Image: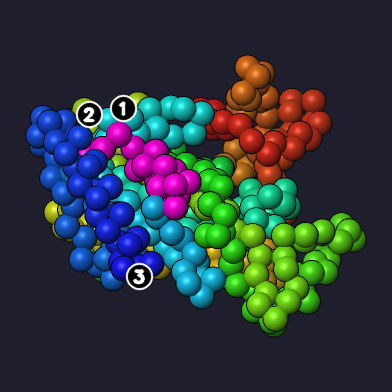
Amino acid sequence: MDMDNETDSSIARRVEQVEKRYSDFARKARASKPQMPETTEAVDELMAFAALDSTNILGRKMLASGELRVVDAHGQPRMAAMCADAQTAGHGRLGRQWSDKAGGASFLVTYITALPKRLVTDSHYNGWFTIIAGLATLDALNDALAKCGAKPLDPAHGLELKWPNDIFYNGHKLGGILAELVQLPEGLNRLAVLQSQLSSILQEQRGDGKITPVSSVSNSDDTSELAVGVMFGIGINLDIAAESLPTPISTSLQLLYAPLPDPPTMRDMVAARLATSLKRRLAALVTDPQNGLPRLLEETRAKCWTLGREVEAKFTDGSTLTGKAISLNSDASLTIQDAHGAPHVVKTGDVGVLA
């Protein structure tokens, strides 16, 4: 049996195990296996489940074990997607539970790929990957809405990003993104490097005048570099009734745009377009991070709902910071100016916009 057939068999066995384990829950939730013909064409591997605990949990296990391979035989990144109709343990950032509803009403898809370790461990770049997933989500939603002729019910507003990982519409949360890194098994963790990229990678000049060490890159006839598995778990409310929304600031797509196709069709349209945009955007940053970063910063500033608003940042140690979000910085951090005029740079935290 060759390597590809062995991998396919392993994935098929895993899918069968998960379906059997969660069959009772799927029946009670009235969940069915998603049919996603457009997404099948857009990704290298699609795994669809009526129900499971969490697409991110399963993705992490399969990456770590080598069951799911995100680097192909030529050292190129692969894009896989896991979609569920319902989850028992879906969650967002900081461990918050993600509420969902079966029947395509909730978009529950995790995109899984490989990225160079030199970038995902570099503080100048690694904050951008979640934002890139957010921009890809905006691309996908806007393109799918245009394709089906849907118009905003309130033309004064549109879809935007709330720093760092939410999709917002006029102060209401439509969706969220959870990014996770997973160490890949030895032998499945090297990406090919184009010769045209090599010199810029080995001597990467940053704006602060320092040279970034790139010890993870091997300079030989068979040039490669260490890779890390990256997962983007994305949840979007596609067709949740207003009375069923989990929080007062939540919203759902059918409350904002019309006409829309049935939820399973919309899920497939968005998922396929998101995969295409995510692949394109990640490749652009990996190929030319120095020139790609200024364009990314300019685009994100234009689409960031947080900027210019009074916010409260909550940190994992329990402390808070209140002030005005005045700047999105080149490393994807947010600058908040407090009541005394002092600037504070926030790299991680939960930033909510005050009423």
Residue drawn at (28%, 47%) of the image: 14
Which disc number belongs to residue 246? Answer: 1
Image location (x, y in percent) of residue 306: 57, 42
Decide: is 325 above or below 197: above
**Whole-Å distance between the Cαs marked 2 and 1?**
6 Å
Which mark is first along the chain, 2 or 3? Answer: 3
Which disc number belongs to residue 2? Answer: 3
Decide: is 278 above or below 241: below
Question: In front: mark 3 or mark 2?
Answer: 3
Q: Is residue 252 left or right of residue 75?
A: left
Q: Is residue 49 left or right of residue 325?
A: left
Image location (x, y in percent) of residue 114: 52, 59
In this rendered view, identify the residue nearer to me: 280 or 229.
229
Q: Residues within 10 Å of mark 2 (few under 14, many from 20)?
A: few
Q: Which residues are magenta?
A: 51-66
Q: Is residue 4 left or right of residue 289?
A: left
**Whole-Å distance between the Cαs marked 3 and 2?**
49 Å
Image location (x, y in percent) of residue 320: 65, 21
Q: Is residue 55 magenta?
A: yes
Q: Is residue 353 left or right of residue 136?
A: right
Magenta highlight: main SS: helix
* Mark 2 lies on residue: 244
Q: Is residue 231 magenta?
A: no
Image quadrant of residue 219? Answer: bottom right
**Quarter containing the N terminus:** bottom left
Residue drawn at (73%, 76%) of the image: 220
